[in-house]
Image: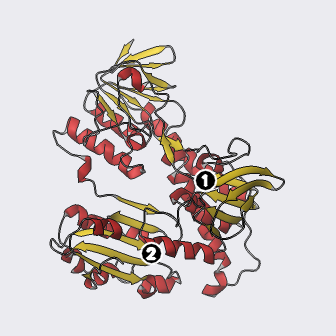
Amino acid sequence: MKNFDALIIGAGQAGPSLAGRLTRSGMTVALVERKLFGGTCVNTGCMPTKTLVASAYAAHVARRAADFGVVLAAPPRIDMKKVKARADAVSANARTGVERYLRGMRDCTVIHGHARLESPTVVSVGNEELSAPRIFLNVGGRASVPAMPGVDDVPFLTNTTMLAIDTVPDHLVVVGGSYVGLEFAQMYRRFGAAVTIVEMAPRLIGREDEDVSEEIRQIFEREGITVRTSARCISLSPHERGVSVGVDCPDGPPHAIGSHVLLAVGRRPNTDDLGLDKAGVATDARGYITVDESLATNVPGIWALGDCNGRGAFTHTAYNDYEIVAANLLDGQHRELRQRVPAYALYTDPPLGRVGLTDTQARQSGRPLLVAKRPMTRVGRAVEKDETQGFMKAVVDAETHRILGAAILGTGGDEAIHGVIDIMNANVAYEVLQHAVPIHPTVSELLPTLLGDLAPMQPAH
């Protein structure tokens, strides 16, 4: 048995950075990765998909060139093999960089293999056993494949296998109208595919406010994407043109025929083959590892970081998990998950930047609220770019004057939202942002103007 001061299972967003901090503090570390270094973000998530989004945006702008007074000699053509090669290269470069960083780290032993817990202090990798008083689980997650009728009878794609496609589908049917599904739906529409979205809920991205969901639906439908919501029963069956997706919707035909079908109906943690039971590590009903506010599991000396703990499911939250653990273990601090201001983005075009509570969640608090909303048609930067779809809005506690939440669905929304994120993290009154003097012309410059429009929230109807 080989003994270390710490074992890290998984080389996702949290693991490599934690290895760096632990080794710099004088500890010996073993990091075990069973497949691809860099985790979901580098290999099947943020980096390759946002590279594809960028290619799709370039195609969209090229088609609109005449709107900007630019005349192209011929209509733009999509070279999907080159599009895919570019995304592959971005991922490969990042993955290689992560592995090189770890293998060059002093006092860090990198092991390629499948790690399983044998006890609260012992991990096996093949025939080898490793021991340490501290174990950190950073094993990530993967696409969930529900047991819907016919799923075993047809070929289907997930967010991972979708990245292997180097041709444009004739008709892509996306089952799932949430974040992953929407990004793939729009990008492949812009690559030239016919696209249909099938969603069981009454509206897209149901965790967002209704006005955000409706605006995104209108944006998609203007681009020629068919949206089928309230699909109470979804089934799959073979068809001569690919796959028939049966939908039980209030209106429209009972089937959507696709050459390809993408299942984008959620994620599940990679915890079912980790040997958690041998170590006594508790999970919830969905398999996520249960952690406290410091990321510690119920077993002393074992922590869970990133997607596998169900407390964030984003690259930035996984990295923050590392920061919390490192600060508490090595810096004598007492940082907790509850201190994190939740924020994320949806990378459709235009993107959605979100922070804090939705309007609906804020109403449920029962506190007096102030709200403001402004269409992107009144944002000079959006007008100049001729990208005026969407809006920005904010909700504020009327008594404390703290911003409770905000959404920017519009050009640059994923960047401009950081002004609000910073104010919320600083825990200061909204007037601090309202009295700022932002740069013109930007999207961010409308945030003070937006806050100047705050008015009491009217009761929900």
Gap in Å between the C-alphas at discs 1 and 2? 33 Å
Toward which corner of the image does residue 131 lie, by quadrant?
A: top left
Specify whether residue 350 is in view. Answer: no
The percent coordinates of residue 34 (x first, y second) are: 52, 30
Residue 307 appears at what percent x and percent y? 42, 43
Q: Is residue 256 above or below residue 385?
A: above
Write down the residue under mark 2: 211
The circle drawn on residue 192 is: none
Check disc 2: other Cα within 10 Å, few if <14, some if 14-19, many if 20+. Answer: few
Residue 276 versus residue 221 in the image, above or below: above
Amino acid carrying mark 1 in the image: Ala
Looking at the picture, tell me which residue is in the foreground, 98 or 42. Answer: 42
Q: Is residue 92 above or below residue 401?
A: above
Q: In what element is the residue under mark 1?
A: helix
Along the line of sight, which residue is nearer the eye, 34 or 230?
Answer: 230
* Lower sequence index among marks 1 and 2: 1
How are the colours assigned in the image? Answer: secondary structure
Residue 197 pos. (x, y %):
63, 63
- Which quarter of the figure is the N terminus placed in? top left
Residue 454, quarter of the rendered image = bottom left
Image quadrant where residue 106 sits: top left
Residue at 50% x, 82% y: name it: 388
Please name the residue that numbered disc 1 is placed on.
87
When the figure is inspected, residue 25 is found, relative to residue 258, above or below; the finding is above
- Residue 173 appears left or right of 136: right
Q: Amino acid at mark 2?
A: Asp
